[in-house]
């Protein structure tokens, strides 16, 4: 499925060689976030937009099984190389557009994680994506992204290159957007400049 104004996979494929120069600084906060989420052992996770795998490798250590998808083949290849180098065996990488995820092809997972993906999209696509991934989550959807109201010039520059919706995202109300898709906020916390939103299906499907 193609969306107007979406940054293409070719852009992410081009930035792979430099991506981790910036993104490796996310590993420490990701580790702290996973600790703070108090994840129960033995669960499965779908990771949407895994990039070079910085969160993937940490998820693999706390989940029984992880499926990580990204639409950029070179991002995925780097993630797979990093996972293999660390002896990770419980992650499956698949090249997929996040908007094309379906339960028919993927089944469901206890958790769906997505890190630094939602700000990439305009609000209408953000909501569409949330509604898509909500269907694949039996228990929780966890979103990690820029914390609201914390404008940083260094992020604004990176995001200008990425042609994302950074400024609009940090001034938007993600829980309100998620409610429309049937997701209710369970908790929100901040880890440095990162916001973490934990959602559950409002219908109580997993309760
Ligand atoms: C800013 S990076 C974040 C990567 C990773 N989650 C992290 O925290 O380092 C965004 C990632 O989302 C992927 N992405 C963007 N749009 C996508 C889409 N429609 N479907 C699948 N992946 C997408 C990009 O290829 C890129 O790897």
Image: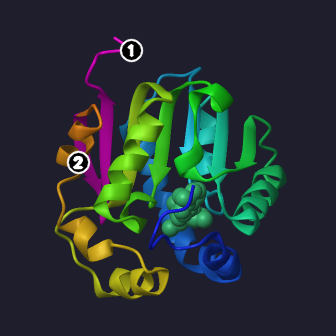
The correct choice, above or below, for 200 with respect to 60 in the image is: above
Q: Secondary structure at mark 2?
A: helix
Q: Secondary structure at mark 1?
A: loop
Crowd rating for badge 1 (residues with CA inside 10 Å; few <14, some 14–19, many 20+): few
**Residue 160, picture quadrant:** bottom left
Residue interval drawn in magenta: 185-207
State the residue position of label 2. 177
State the residue position of label 1. 206
Rendering colour mode: rainbow
Count how many numbered circles sit on residues in the image.
Answer: 2
Q: Is residue 201 magenta?
A: yes
Could you tell me residue 114's position as x and y percent? 47, 49
Query: In whole angstroms, how far apart are the C-alphas of marks 1 and 2?
Result: 21 Å
The numbered mark at residue 182 is none
* Viewer-nearest of discs 1 and 2: 2
Q: Which image quarter is the N terminus in?
A: bottom right
Crowd rating for badge 2 (residues with CA inside 10 Å; few <14, some 14–19, many 20+): some
Image quarter where ligand 1 lies: bottom right
Is residue 162 at all visible to an observer of this figure?
yes
Q: Residue at 32% across / 73% down in the picture? A: 166
Q: Residue at 34% across / 65% down in the picture? A: 122
């Amino acid at each position: 499925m193609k969306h107007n104004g979406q940054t293409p996979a070719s852009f992410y494929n081009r930035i792979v060689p430099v991506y981790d120069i910036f993104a490796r600084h996310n590993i420490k906060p990701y580790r702290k976030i996973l600790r703070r989420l108090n994840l129960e052992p033995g669960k499965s996770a779908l990771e949407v937009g895994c990039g070079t795998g910085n969160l993937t490798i940490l998820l693999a250590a706390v989940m029984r099984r992880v499926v990580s998808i990204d639409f950029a083949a070179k991002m995925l290849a780097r993630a797979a190389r990093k996972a293999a180098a660390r002896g990770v065996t419980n992650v499956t990488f698949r090249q997929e557009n996040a908007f094309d995820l379906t339960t028919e092809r993927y089944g469901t997972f206890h958790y769906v994680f997505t890190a630094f993906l939602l700000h990439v999209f305009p609000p209408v696509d953000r909501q569409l994506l949330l509604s898509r991934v909500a269907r694949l989550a039996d228990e929780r959807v966890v979103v990690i992204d820029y914390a609201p109201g914390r404008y940083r010039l260094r992020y604004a520059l990176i995001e200008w290159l990425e042609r994302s919706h950074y400024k609009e995202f940090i001034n938007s109300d993600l829980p309100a957007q998620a409610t429309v898709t049937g997701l209710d906020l369970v908790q929100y916390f901040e880890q440095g400049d990162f916001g973490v939103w934990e959602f559950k299906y409002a219908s109580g499907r997993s309760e």
